[in-house]
Amino acid sequence: MCLIAIAWKTDAHWPLILAGNRDEFHARPTDPASFWRDAPNVIAGRDLTAGGTWLGVSAADRFAAVTNYRERLDPPADARSRGHLVGDFLRGSQTPEEFMAEVAAEADRYAGFNLFAGDRDTLMYFSNRDGPPRALPPGHYALSNATLDTPWPKVERMRAAFARQLDAQPDPSPEALLTLLDDREPAPEAEWPETGLAPERERLLSAPFIVSPTYGTRASSVLLMAATGKTIFVERGFDAEGCALETRKFMFFAPPVAAPQ
């Protein structure tokens, strides 16, 4: 993912509302969201080059998402794919806190990343460019390719639009959130972050939804978890011209939790 907005425990009926865009080179082979054959409880897209994913959910009420950290540094020579972080959490049984502690202990195995991992009780955030893992309190969050809530123009625009949308429509609509993600307007030049890229590249990447022949938004995703145990996951794919392809929708209910004896 390269742009993620999250409402975490801001609504009693919908503890998690997540919307995000995955930006990637169009030549990189990818499978759309589906149940994984080697992990049947996991629903996620899949990067066919390294085998990981950028966003996913499991039938065990676990979810995770990762973005790359934009920097002009060479990755470690034997760097592990950052997409494996999401898959490892979704397939595992550790608590979010335990998982993030393990990731932090081997953070130098990866190029720069930002990672969300959570369940219905806890949302953890960790970046190997921004201190130790931390549990996030209820609130609205937005993330791109810098650390959490860095005020890049597309982050600020998406955070504000996301909050307005949820205020106007408390029962979240996946279609409305997908429309929100389809914002293709670059930021004004005066607002571009200074990340060392050429100006034309900064302009291209300043839009929440990126369109170019070689690199751009490949998928938009919405993940909703309700207090009732219902989970809704929607992914819409796009081609190199920014035209919508297939939309995949998944809905399931978490298994009931036994009351303490």
Image (cartoon, rainbow, N blue to C red):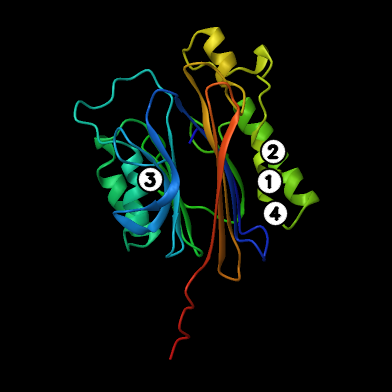
Neighbours of disc 1 within 10 Å: few (<14), some (14-19), many (20+): few
Marks 4 and 1, how far apart at CA: 9 Å
Q: Secondary structure at mark 4?
A: loop
Neighbours of disc 3 within 10 Å: few (<14), some (14-19), many (20+): few
Q: Earlier in the sequence, mark 2 or mark 4?
A: 4
Identified by mark 2, the residue type is Thr
Percent of width and height locating residue 170? 75, 56
Percent of width and height locating residue 228? 60, 71
**Residue 97 visible, this orientation:** yes
Look at mark 3 in the image and give the residue it sits on: 132
Marks 2 and 1, how far apart at CA: 6 Å
30 vs 256, nearest the viewer: 30
Q: Are marks 2 and 1 in contact (CB under 8 Å)?
A: yes
Query: Residue 175 has which mark?
Result: 1
Q: Secondary structure at mark 2?
A: helix
Identified by mark 1, the residue type is Glu
Q: Secondary structure at mark 1?
A: helix
**Residue 97 as seen in the image, left or right of residue 18:** left
Look at mark 4 in the image and give the residue it sits on: 172
Identified by mark 3, the residue type is Pro
Q: Earlier in the sequence, mark 3 or mark 1?
A: 3
